[in-house]
Amino acid sequence: MKKKIVSAVLAAIMLTASACGNGGASASSTVTVSPISISETPVSVSTSDKEPEPAPQVEVIPEGMYRSELTNEIISKDIETQRPLAIMVDNESTALPHYGTTKSDIVYEMVNSNINGRITRLMCIIKDWKNITEFGNVRSLRPTNVIIAPEYNAIVIHDGGPFWINDWLAKRNAKQHLNGGFARIDRGKAGFYEEYVTVKDYKGVGEYAGNSYFGVETKIKKAGYETEYNDFYMGKHFVFATEEHANEAYSDAVTAKTVELPFPHNKSTLKYNETTKTYDYYEYDKLYKDAIDDAVMSFKNLIIYEAKLEPYEPLSDGYMIYNAINSGEGYFITNGNAIPIQWSKANMEELTIFSKDGYPIYLNTGKTYIALVPSDSWDDVVMK
Protein backbone atom coordinates (compact mmCIF):
# COMPACT_ATOMS: atom_id res chain seq x y z
CA MET A 1 0.00 0.00 0.00
CA LYS A 2 1.22 3.48 -0.79
CA LYS A 3 0.28 6.84 0.64
CA LYS A 4 0.08 9.94 -1.55
CA ILE A 5 1.51 12.94 0.21
CA VAL A 6 1.03 16.33 -1.30
CA SER A 7 2.56 19.32 0.42
CA ALA A 8 0.13 22.14 0.84
CA VAL A 9 3.03 24.53 0.74
CA LEU A 10 4.06 23.18 -2.65
CA ALA A 11 0.51 23.07 -4.03
CA ALA A 12 1.04 26.31 -5.90
CA ILE A 13 4.29 28.28 -6.13
CA MET A 14 4.21 31.57 -7.94
CA LEU A 15 7.41 32.42 -9.70
CA THR A 16 7.70 36.03 -10.60
CA ALA A 17 10.26 37.20 -13.11
CA SER A 18 11.06 40.84 -13.62
CA ALA A 19 12.49 42.13 -16.84
CA CYS A 20 15.08 44.89 -16.66
CA GLY A 21 14.83 48.00 -18.75
CA ASN A 22 12.81 51.16 -19.14
CA GLY A 23 9.15 50.47 -18.37
CA GLY A 24 9.81 46.71 -18.26
CA ALA A 25 6.76 44.56 -17.51
CA SER A 26 6.60 41.70 -14.94
CA ALA A 27 5.36 38.12 -15.62
CA SER A 28 4.34 35.28 -13.34
CA SER A 29 3.69 31.53 -13.78
CA THR A 30 2.34 28.71 -11.61
CA VAL A 31 4.25 25.41 -11.01
CA THR A 32 2.24 22.33 -10.06
CA VAL A 33 4.08 19.73 -7.91
CA SER A 34 3.23 16.07 -8.39
CA PRO A 35 2.48 13.90 -5.34
CA ILE A 36 5.45 12.03 -3.78
CA SER A 37 5.07 8.29 -3.21
CA ILE A 38 6.69 6.80 -0.06
CA SER A 39 6.85 3.04 0.52
CA GLU A 40 5.97 1.65 3.93
CA THR A 41 8.23 -1.37 3.37
CA PRO A 42 11.24 -1.27 5.79
CA VAL A 43 14.56 -0.40 4.22
CA SER A 44 17.12 -3.22 4.35
CA VAL A 45 20.84 -2.32 4.51
CA SER A 46 23.41 -5.01 3.84
CA THR A 47 26.34 -5.24 6.30
CA SER A 48 27.89 -8.35 4.86
CA ASP A 49 30.95 -6.37 3.73
CA LYS A 50 31.56 -4.73 7.14
CA GLU A 51 32.95 -6.24 10.36
CA PRO A 52 31.05 -5.33 13.52
CA GLU A 53 32.81 -2.94 15.87
CA PRO A 54 34.53 -4.92 18.65
CA ALA A 55 33.24 -4.39 22.15
CA PRO A 56 35.66 -2.62 24.50
CA GLN A 57 37.81 -5.13 26.34
CA VAL A 58 37.60 -4.90 30.11
CA GLU A 59 40.36 -6.76 31.91
CA VAL A 60 39.17 -9.23 34.47
CA ILE A 61 41.79 -9.87 37.14
CA PRO A 62 41.26 -13.06 39.12
CA GLU A 63 39.83 -12.60 42.58
CA GLY A 64 42.48 -12.05 45.20
CA MET A 65 45.03 -10.84 42.65
CA TYR A 66 46.24 -7.44 41.38
CA ARG A 67 48.78 -5.98 38.97
CA SER A 68 52.12 -5.38 40.66
CA GLU A 69 53.23 -1.77 40.84
CA LEU A 70 56.80 -2.94 40.13
CA THR A 71 56.30 -5.28 37.16
CA ASN A 72 52.62 -5.01 36.17
CA GLU A 73 52.43 -8.79 36.52
CA ILE A 74 49.37 -10.30 38.20
CA ILE A 75 50.31 -11.29 41.75
CA SER A 76 48.61 -11.96 45.07
CA LYS A 77 46.61 -9.10 46.51
CA ASP A 78 47.80 -10.23 49.94
CA ILE A 79 51.02 -8.25 49.40
CA GLU A 80 49.53 -5.27 47.55
CA THR A 81 50.51 -2.80 50.27
CA GLN A 82 53.66 -4.63 51.40
CA ARG A 83 56.86 -2.62 51.18
CA PRO A 84 59.65 -4.14 49.10
CA LEU A 85 63.18 -4.80 50.27
CA ALA A 86 66.23 -3.26 48.59
CA ILE A 87 69.04 -5.78 49.13
CA MET A 88 72.68 -4.92 48.47
CA VAL A 89 74.50 -7.78 46.72
CA ASP A 90 78.23 -8.09 46.07
CA ASN A 91 79.20 -8.56 42.43
CA GLU A 92 82.81 -9.69 42.73
CA SER A 93 83.47 -12.97 40.91
CA THR A 94 84.40 -14.66 44.19
CA ALA A 95 80.93 -13.80 45.53
CA LEU A 96 79.28 -15.86 42.81
CA PRO A 97 77.03 -17.68 42.47
CA HIS A 98 74.32 -15.57 44.05
CA TYR A 99 71.27 -17.01 45.78
CA GLY A 100 67.69 -15.87 45.22
CA THR A 101 68.51 -12.81 43.12
CA THR A 102 66.46 -13.93 40.12
CA LYS A 103 63.35 -13.40 42.29
CA SER A 104 63.99 -9.65 42.15
CA ASP A 105 61.45 -7.41 40.43
CA ILE A 106 63.93 -4.64 39.63
CA VAL A 107 67.72 -4.80 39.68
CA TYR A 108 69.98 -1.76 39.78
CA GLU A 109 73.62 -2.06 38.79
CA MET A 110 76.15 0.69 39.36
CA VAL A 111 79.82 1.22 39.96
CA ASN A 112 80.72 0.43 43.55
CA SER A 113 84.21 1.90 43.55
CA ASN A 114 86.49 4.00 41.39
CA ILE A 115 89.21 1.36 41.78
CA ASN A 116 89.35 -2.38 41.03
CA GLY A 117 88.23 -1.83 37.45
CA ARG A 118 85.15 0.02 38.63
CA ILE A 119 83.60 -3.12 40.04
CA THR A 120 79.81 -2.95 40.27
CA ARG A 121 77.31 -3.84 42.96
CA LEU A 122 73.67 -4.87 42.60
CA MET A 123 70.70 -3.43 44.47
CA CYS A 124 67.82 -5.89 44.18
CA ILE A 125 64.26 -4.62 44.70
CA ILE A 126 61.97 -7.49 45.68
CA LYS A 127 58.29 -7.24 46.55
CA ASP A 128 57.41 -10.84 47.52
CA TRP A 129 60.26 -11.21 50.00
CA LYS A 130 58.36 -13.37 52.49
CA ASN A 131 58.68 -16.29 50.09
CA ILE A 132 62.45 -16.21 49.69
CA THR A 133 64.54 -18.96 51.26
CA GLU A 134 67.89 -17.18 51.15
CA PHE A 135 69.06 -14.11 49.27
CA GLY A 136 72.50 -12.69 48.70
CA ASN A 137 75.25 -12.52 49.55
CA VAL A 138 74.67 -9.25 51.39
CA ARG A 139 77.31 -6.55 51.21
CA SER A 140 77.83 -2.89 52.08
CA LEU A 141 75.86 0.16 51.07
CA ARG A 142 76.81 3.23 49.03
CA PRO A 143 75.33 6.76 49.10
CA THR A 144 73.77 6.46 45.63
CA ASN A 145 71.75 3.44 46.77
CA VAL A 146 70.42 5.45 49.73
CA ILE A 147 69.27 8.15 47.29
CA ILE A 148 67.38 5.70 45.05
CA ALA A 149 65.89 3.09 47.42
CA PRO A 150 63.33 5.50 48.98
CA GLU A 151 61.73 5.83 45.54
CA TYR A 152 60.22 2.40 46.26
CA ASN A 153 59.62 3.03 49.99
CA ALA A 154 61.94 0.03 50.40
CA ILE A 155 63.61 -1.19 53.55
CA VAL A 156 67.31 -1.31 52.68
CA ILE A 157 69.26 -4.45 53.58
CA HIS A 158 73.05 -4.10 53.83
CA ASP A 159 76.12 -4.91 55.87
CA GLY A 160 77.88 -1.67 56.70
CA GLY A 161 79.30 0.90 54.34
CA PRO A 162 81.63 3.91 54.36
CA PHE A 163 80.79 6.70 56.80
CA TRP A 164 79.62 8.84 53.87
CA ILE A 165 76.34 6.91 53.91
CA ASN A 166 75.47 8.28 57.37
CA ASP A 167 74.26 11.71 56.28
CA TRP A 168 72.04 10.14 53.64
CA LEU A 169 70.61 7.54 56.01
CA ALA A 170 69.69 10.39 58.34
CA LYS A 171 67.18 11.69 55.75
CA ARG A 172 63.66 11.18 57.02
CA ASN A 173 62.63 8.80 54.19
CA ALA A 174 65.82 6.69 54.39
CA LYS A 175 66.08 5.90 58.10
CA GLN A 176 64.49 2.46 57.92
CA HIS A 177 67.33 0.12 57.00
CA LEU A 178 68.77 -3.10 58.43
CA ASN A 179 72.52 -3.31 58.85
CA GLY A 180 74.18 -6.73 59.10
CA GLY A 181 73.57 -9.67 61.40
CA PHE A 182 71.95 -11.90 58.79
CA ALA A 183 72.53 -15.62 58.39
CA ARG A 184 76.08 -16.82 57.83
CA ILE A 185 75.93 -19.84 55.56
CA ASP A 186 79.06 -21.88 55.00
CA ARG A 187 79.94 -21.80 51.29
CA GLY A 188 83.62 -22.44 51.72
CA LYS A 189 84.44 -18.79 51.06
CA ALA A 190 85.72 -15.84 53.03
CA GLY A 191 83.19 -14.87 55.71
CA PHE A 192 82.20 -11.58 54.14
CA TYR A 193 80.96 -13.49 51.08
CA GLU A 194 78.74 -15.75 53.21
CA GLU A 195 75.97 -13.50 54.59
CA TYR A 196 72.44 -14.08 53.31
CA VAL A 197 68.95 -12.78 54.01
CA THR A 198 66.56 -15.42 55.31
CA VAL A 199 62.94 -14.72 56.17
CA LYS A 200 62.88 -16.83 59.31
CA ASP A 201 65.49 -17.06 62.06
CA TYR A 202 68.41 -19.29 61.13
CA LYS A 203 70.70 -21.64 63.08
CA GLY A 204 74.19 -21.92 61.65
CA VAL A 205 75.76 -25.18 60.49
CA GLY A 206 79.26 -26.18 59.47
CA GLU A 207 81.67 -23.34 60.15
CA TYR A 208 78.85 -21.39 61.83
CA ALA A 209 77.44 -24.21 63.96
CA GLY A 210 76.21 -22.94 67.31
CA ASN A 211 75.38 -19.47 65.99
CA SER A 212 71.83 -18.15 65.66
CA TYR A 213 70.75 -15.38 63.31
CA PHE A 214 67.54 -13.37 63.16
CA GLY A 215 65.54 -13.58 59.94
CA VAL A 216 64.39 -10.42 58.19
CA GLU A 217 60.86 -10.67 59.63
CA THR A 218 62.23 -10.69 63.18
CA LYS A 219 64.69 -7.87 62.43
CA ILE A 220 61.97 -5.66 60.95
CA LYS A 221 59.73 -6.27 63.95
CA LYS A 222 62.54 -5.56 66.43
CA ALA A 223 63.39 -2.33 64.61
CA GLY A 224 59.75 -1.21 64.75
CA TYR A 225 59.54 -0.67 61.00
CA GLU A 226 56.29 -0.76 59.03
CA THR A 227 55.94 -3.63 56.59
CA GLU A 228 53.16 -1.77 54.75
CA TYR A 229 53.67 1.30 52.57
CA ASN A 230 53.95 4.34 54.84
CA ASP A 231 53.66 8.12 54.47
CA PHE A 232 56.91 8.27 52.47
CA TYR A 233 55.58 6.11 49.65
CA MET A 234 55.82 8.13 46.43
CA GLY A 235 53.36 6.04 44.42
CA LYS A 236 53.89 3.88 41.35
CA HIS A 237 57.30 4.40 39.85
CA PHE A 238 56.53 3.37 36.25
CA VAL A 239 53.79 3.54 33.64
CA PHE A 240 53.09 0.25 31.87
CA ALA A 241 51.78 -0.22 28.35
CA THR A 242 48.41 -1.94 27.91
CA GLU A 243 49.71 -3.68 24.79
CA GLU A 244 53.24 -5.01 24.36
CA HIS A 245 55.48 -2.94 22.11
CA ALA A 246 59.02 -2.79 20.78
CA ASN A 247 59.55 0.99 20.66
CA GLU A 248 58.61 0.72 16.98
CA ALA A 249 56.51 3.89 17.11
CA TYR A 250 59.63 6.07 17.39
CA SER A 251 61.60 7.15 14.32
CA ASP A 252 64.82 7.26 16.34
CA ALA A 253 64.57 3.67 17.59
CA VAL A 254 67.68 1.57 16.94
CA THR A 255 68.38 -2.14 17.09
CA ALA A 256 69.57 -3.32 20.50
CA LYS A 257 69.78 -7.11 20.59
CA THR A 258 73.01 -6.93 22.59
CA VAL A 259 73.86 -4.24 25.14
CA GLU A 260 77.43 -4.04 26.43
CA LEU A 261 78.02 -1.77 29.41
CA PRO A 262 81.33 -0.03 30.19
CA PHE A 263 81.89 -1.88 33.47
CA PRO A 264 85.37 -3.27 32.74
CA HIS A 265 85.71 -5.46 35.82
CA ASN A 266 82.71 -7.73 35.34
CA LYS A 267 81.80 -6.85 31.70
CA SER A 268 78.03 -6.64 32.23
CA THR A 269 76.19 -7.57 29.04
CA LEU A 270 72.52 -8.12 28.24
CA LYS A 271 71.52 -10.28 25.28
CA TYR A 272 68.06 -10.51 23.77
CA ASN A 273 66.58 -13.99 23.94
CA GLU A 274 64.29 -14.50 20.93
CA THR A 275 62.50 -17.37 22.66
CA THR A 276 61.62 -15.67 25.94
CA LYS A 277 61.51 -12.13 24.46
CA THR A 278 63.59 -10.92 27.39
CA TYR A 279 67.21 -9.88 27.97
CA ASP A 280 69.49 -12.41 29.67
CA TYR A 281 72.19 -11.02 31.95
CA TYR A 282 75.85 -12.00 31.49
CA GLU A 283 78.92 -11.05 33.48
CA TYR A 284 82.50 -12.31 33.54
CA ASP A 285 81.72 -13.64 30.03
CA LYS A 286 79.19 -16.13 31.44
CA LEU A 287 75.42 -16.41 31.57
CA TYR A 288 74.28 -15.44 35.08
CA LYS A 289 72.34 -18.18 36.88
CA ASP A 290 70.82 -18.39 40.35
CA ALA A 291 72.45 -21.02 42.57
CA ILE A 292 69.11 -22.08 44.06
CA ASP A 293 67.30 -23.26 40.93
CA ASP A 294 69.72 -22.53 38.06
CA ALA A 295 67.33 -19.82 36.84
CA VAL A 296 68.68 -17.18 34.44
CA MET A 297 68.44 -13.55 35.50
CA SER A 298 66.37 -12.03 32.71
CA PHE A 299 64.55 -8.73 32.12
CA LYS A 300 61.77 -7.41 29.90
CA ASN A 301 62.85 -3.78 30.19
CA LEU A 302 66.28 -2.16 30.31
CA ILE A 303 66.90 1.44 31.39
CA ILE A 304 70.45 2.70 30.97
CA TYR A 305 71.27 6.23 32.04
CA GLU A 306 74.32 8.37 32.58
CA ALA A 307 75.26 10.29 35.70
CA LYS A 308 78.49 11.92 36.78
CA LEU A 309 80.65 10.18 39.37
CA GLU A 310 81.83 12.41 42.20
CA PRO A 311 84.75 10.84 44.13
CA TYR A 312 85.10 11.30 47.86
CA GLU A 313 88.43 12.02 49.52
CA PRO A 314 90.85 10.40 49.96
CA LEU A 315 90.81 9.31 46.34
CA SER A 316 92.84 6.19 47.11
CA ASP A 317 89.82 4.64 48.86
CA GLY A 318 87.85 4.65 45.62
CA TYR A 319 84.61 5.74 47.30
CA MET A 320 82.27 7.85 45.18
CA ILE A 321 78.71 8.99 44.65
CA TYR A 322 76.71 9.37 41.46
CA ASN A 323 75.17 12.77 40.89
CA ALA A 324 71.77 11.09 40.82
CA ILE A 325 69.79 14.19 41.84
CA ASN A 326 70.12 15.90 38.51
CA SER A 327 69.08 15.22 34.91
CA GLY A 328 70.61 13.72 31.81
CA GLU A 329 70.24 11.28 28.96
CA GLY A 330 69.65 7.58 28.71
CA TYR A 331 68.14 4.69 26.75
CA PHE A 332 65.02 2.62 27.17
CA ILE A 333 65.35 -0.83 25.62
CA THR A 334 62.73 -3.52 25.13
CA ASN A 335 61.97 -6.29 22.63
CA GLY A 336 65.16 -5.69 20.64
CA ASN A 337 64.93 -1.92 20.16
CA ALA A 338 66.30 1.11 22.03
CA ILE A 339 65.16 4.71 22.10
CA PRO A 340 66.98 7.72 23.57
CA ILE A 341 65.28 9.10 26.68
CA GLN A 342 65.77 11.75 29.33
CA TRP A 343 65.91 11.33 33.10
CA SER A 344 65.49 13.76 35.97
CA LYS A 345 65.30 13.66 39.75
CA ALA A 346 64.48 16.89 41.56
CA ASN A 347 65.33 15.90 45.13
CA MET A 348 65.56 13.06 47.62
CA GLU A 349 61.79 12.83 48.05
CA GLU A 350 60.80 12.63 44.39
CA LEU A 351 60.97 9.83 41.85
CA THR A 352 63.53 9.61 39.09
CA ILE A 353 61.46 10.38 35.99
CA PHE A 354 62.27 8.62 32.73
CA SER A 355 60.69 10.35 29.74
CA LYS A 356 60.68 10.63 25.97
CA ASP A 357 60.06 14.07 24.45
CA GLY A 358 58.42 15.22 27.67
CA TYR A 359 56.15 12.17 28.09
CA PRO A 360 56.73 9.18 30.39
CA ILE A 361 58.06 6.04 28.78
CA TYR A 362 55.77 3.00 28.75
CA LEU A 363 57.37 -0.15 30.07
CA ASN A 364 56.26 -3.60 29.02
CA THR A 365 54.96 -5.97 31.67
CA GLY A 366 57.87 -7.76 33.32
CA LYS A 367 61.07 -7.22 35.26
CA THR A 368 63.33 -4.22 34.78
CA TYR A 369 67.11 -3.77 34.86
CA ILE A 370 68.46 -0.27 35.51
CA ALA A 371 72.14 0.66 35.10
CA LEU A 372 73.77 3.93 36.09
CA VAL A 373 76.69 4.50 33.76
CA PRO A 374 79.38 7.05 34.67
CA SER A 375 79.23 10.08 32.37
CA ASP A 376 82.90 9.74 31.47
CA SER A 377 82.26 6.32 29.91
CA TRP A 378 78.76 6.94 28.53
CA ASP A 379 80.03 6.98 24.94
CA ASP A 380 81.40 3.47 25.49
CA VAL A 381 77.94 1.89 25.81
CA VAL A 382 77.55 -0.55 22.89
CA MET A 383 74.20 -1.53 21.38
CA LYS A 384 73.97 -3.80 18.39
Image (cartoon, rainbow, N blue to C red):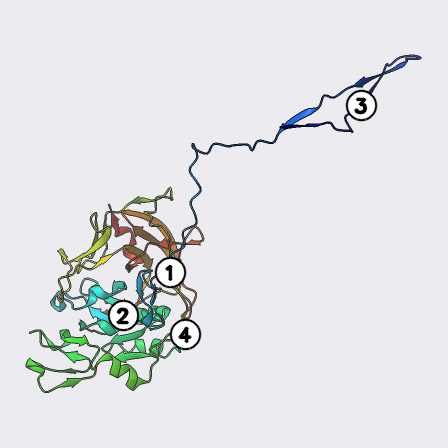
What is the residue that sits farthest to the front in this orientation?
Answer: 1
Nearer to us of marks 3 and 2 is 3
Q: Earlier in the sequence, mark 3 or mark 2?
A: 3
Tell me the element at label 2. loop
The quarter in which the N terminus is drawn is top right
Q: Which residue is mark 3?
A: 12
Badge 3: how crowded within 10 Å, few (<14), some, or many (20+)? few
Closer mark to the observer between disc 1 and disc 2:
2
For the residues bearing labels 2 and 4, Cβ distance under 8 angstroms: no
In the structure shown, which secondary structural element does the residue marked by tag 3 occupy? loop
Amino acid residing under circle 2: Asp
Q: Amino acid at mark 4?
A: Phe
**Mark positioned earlier in the residue sequence (1 or 3):** 3
Image vertical order of residue 115 relative to residue 228, above or below: above
**Which quarter of the figure has residue 291?**
bottom left
Q: Crowding near pointer 4: few (<14 within 10 Å), some, many (20+)?
A: some
Task: Name above or below for residue 166 compared with residue 63.
Answer: below
Checking the image for residue 238, the label placed there is 1
Q: Which residue is mark 2?
A: 128
